[in-house]
Every structure is written in C-alpha cells, then in structure tokens.
Image: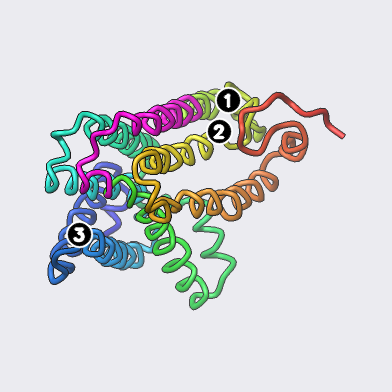
Amino acid sequence: MKKIINSRCLSLLTVLIIYVICFAVGFYGSIFIINNDLLRFFVADIIATVVCFIFSLLFKNTSVYDPYWSVTPIVISLYFFIAYKAYFSIPNIILFAVLAIWGIRLTVNWITTFPNLTHEDYRYSDYRHKLSKGKFFIVNFFGLHMIPTLIVYVCLVPLLYLFMRGNNSYLTLIGAVIMLIGILLELFADRDMHVFLRTTKERVTCKQGLWNYSRHPNYLGENLIWIGIFLSFIVVYSSVWYLSLGFILMILLFEFISIPLAENHHKSRRSDYVDYIKTTSRMLILPHRKSR
C-alpha cells in the first residue's frame, strides 16, 4: 500500500482503476431501472459515489473523490449523447464538445497538480483533524461526497434532456458561448496561479492576471459552465423551466461553502489576504475597491 500511495504513477493508475470500478458498479447496479434514463443515471451516480467513498476510506484520503467532479459529467453525457443519437444535431454536438473540453481540461489540471495519494486537499484535512471520527464520517459522506454529486447531476439534467429530446435549436449556442467564457476564465486563472506558485516562495496572495480583479475567478468560471447549460435549456424548453434550476444550488455551494472555506484558510496563511479582501471583488471581475 505504501508503495502505491507514495508513487505518482501508481497513485494515478490506482485512481483510474477506482473510477472504472465506480462507474461499472453504478451502471450495472442501476440496470433494474428501465424506461427512465434520467432516474437510472441518478441512481447510478449515487451508487458510484458510495463506491468512491468506500475507496476514500480505504486510502484514508477524501481527495480520491476530487476528479469525480469533472469526469462523471462527461461519462454520463456521453452515454446520453450516443444512446439518443444526439450527434445528428449540430447544436448538441457543440454543446457536448464544450462540456467535454471543460471536463478534460479540469481533469488534466488535476492530474498535473496531483503528487500522489499521500496528498489530501487542505479542506478535507482540516475537517479530519478538527472533527471527531464519527462527525468526520458524516461530513465526509454527505458534505464532501454525496451533496456535490447530487448538485452536479441536477445541474447536468438540462443538457441530458436536450440530448434526449433531439435539440436542433441554434439558440442553445447562447449557453455554449457562456460555457466557453467560463472555460477560458478557469484556464487563465489556473495558469496565473501555477506561475505564481512556481515563482513565489513567500506566503503572500496571488494578484496576477485575473486574480488582481477577482478573489475567485476560477469559481466564477465554474459557475458560468452551469449557467451556460441553464441558458441552453431555457431558451428551448421554458415550459419545463424547473428542470434547469440546478445552477442555483451550484452558486449557493460556492458562495456559502467553497469560498468561505478557502478564504478562512488563506487568512490564516497569508498576511496580506485581509487587505486583499477589502480591495478585490469576491467573484466577479471588477475594478479594485478603495480600502476603508
């Protein structure tokens, strides 16, 4: 086990095998549900997450779940794209391509920054050390695994519905454009952060590029992905608008959980972060505010 978790290559291979097992168990574990693929893959997603959670317990590392965020939407969307022959629609091809670009880029970014299975995201480590074993188990299962899975799936439903109904409206490309903007924001934000971390040894705040105008430009980009899917759906199927509101949950997730956790962490590690908060927009790309 030590040889696996200390080796980057073996750790990556292990994560790949884990995900193959998760998706296989999820797919075949939900096969009893027929005539309703949205429900079937909802159940499959839950089963796969439970399997992923079990592996995270085995390796004592919640970061086993990290790539699930970007990999699963591609896998599920690909099934609907092929099963419902959505490839006969140019708008659907573009929407799927944009989603695939988002997921692949995010996954590649995770791979390039992944040292091995000894590394765990600081947020998970904080919970692990601050909470009792029982409380951490509950937070780990629901807060760090299941709730993100459910939110992402609900956000993905509008796109799956478009594939199922044979969307041929070029109006949906409005959403694709928003998604592309989100991908570019994430790309530039990640690039600026990687350069900063390579060249700066002091514990100071990154203010390069987009980070000079937003404290969380990468989260803004992520939200634009799901807002784009919402817009693609609502311009065609406004009569069932309620199927497309998952993006609100995503915004709330970032606003009330992800951002506060990140900012509390940065405040404790970076001496200039409090001043950075005073002058820099929370998420939107905006000019500097005057410090009070």
Per the image, the residue denoted by label 2 is: 217
Rendered location of residue 205, percent (x, y):
65, 33
Give the mark, 2 or 3, whose residue is nearer the N terminus. Answer: 3
* C-beta proximity under 8 Å, tags 1 and 3: no
Determine if the magenta segment contains residue 68. Answer: no
**Callout 1 amino acid:** Leu
Q: Residue 219, relative to residue 137: is it above or below? A: above
- Between 202 and 278, which is closer to the camera in this rendering? 278
**Callout 2 amino acid:** Pro
* C-beta proximity under 8 Å, tags 1 and 2: yes
Q: Tell me the magenta residue range.
A: 161-189
Would you say 36 lies left or right of 114 here? left
Q: In which quarter of the image is residue 163?
A: top left
Quadrant (top left, top right, bottom left, bottom right) of the N terminus:
bottom left
Per the image, the residue denoted by label 1 is: 210
Q: Quadrant of residue 32?
A: bottom left
Give the mark, 1 or 3, whose residue is nearer the N terminus. Answer: 3
Main structural element of the magenta stretch: helix, strand or loop? helix
Res. 118 visible in picture: no
Would you say 49 lies left or right of 211 here? left
Give the mark, 1 or 2, whose residue is nearer the N terminus. Answer: 1
Per the image, the residue denoted by label 3 is: 37
| Disc 2 packing (10 Å; few <14; some 14–19; many ≥20) | many
Residue at image location 23% in from the left, 56% down from the top: 18
Determine if the magenta segment contains residue 188. Answer: yes
Would you say 215 lies left or right of 48 here? right
| Disc 1 packing (10 Å; few <14; some 14–19; many ≥20) | many
Rendered location of residue 193, percent (x, y):
52, 29
Quadrant (top left, top right, bottom left, bottom right) of the C terminus:
top right
Callout 3 secondary element: helix
